[in-house]
Amino acid sequence: MSEIKKYSLAEVKTHNDNRSSWLVINNNVYDVTPFLNEHPGGEEVLLEQAGRDATDPFEDVGHSSDARELMAKYKIGEVIDSERKQVKEKIPDWSSGNDNATSENTMKSWLIPILLAVMATIIYRFYFLS
Ligand code: HEM
């Protein structure tokens, strides 16, 4: 039971209609046949991807963590080692995060010298002009 079943992409490809719909997402193989008419995104999108690697369309939709938990129910195995794709990390999220951090840092690097200058002016006026 604990043995993970391995499937070739050619085998997944044969399960491409509503009698048997398999999908590959992140190197995992899912049999979504019983899920077709339960999928909140509709049966058509799943059938369109049936028999294929649907990682990109699946990720593009931005499925929730609930959806990701639900997937486990339909997992039947994994892609054979020689045909595995490198799982993409969410690089766009990171880079946009980094962009924000960079602009925040730029703000900070301006704010501190300005505050110091204002404080120096106040101290100068207090000591030398009173
Ligand atoms: C085992 C595979 C899949 C599961 C368990 C699943 C599950 C779900 C769930 C639970 C939702 C509701 C929204 C959410 O919670 O994110 C959803 C929405 C959706 N899914 Fe999937 N999905 C799967 C595969 C796919 C694939 C391969 C596509 C291909 C494009 C797809 C396209 C969509 C679309 C378009 C929506 C509607 C999004 C919206 O209305 O905002 N799903 N899916």
Image (cartoon, rainbow, N blue to C red):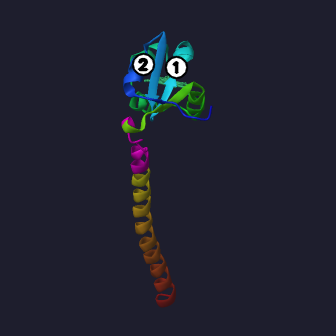
Report the number of discs: 2
Residue 95 in the image: state x and y as whole percent: 39, 50
Numbered tag placed on residue 32 in the rendering: 1
Q: Residue at x 52, y 19 (%)?
A: 32
Measuring from the top left, give residue 47's x and y in whole percent: 43, 15
Gap between marks 2 and 1, in whole Å?
Answer: 9 Å
Based on the picture, tell me whether residue 8 belongs to the magenta stretch: no
Residue at which label 2 appears: 50
Please give left or right for residue 32 compared with residue 10 in the image: right
* Residue drawn 57% across the image and 35% down it: 3
Image vertical order of residue 111 relative to residue 66, above or below: below
Mark 2 Cα shell of 10 Å, populated few (<14), some (14-19), many (≥20): many
Residue 124 on image: x %, y %: 46, 85
Dividing the picture into quadrants, the one containing residue 27 is: top left
Q: Earlier in the sequence, mark 2 or mark 1?
A: 1
The label shown at residue 86 is none
Q: Is residue 18 above or below residue 10?
A: above
From the viewer's perspective, is residue 91 above or below residue 58?
A: below
Question: What residue range appears in magenta?
Answer: 83-96
Location of the N terminus by quadrant is: top right
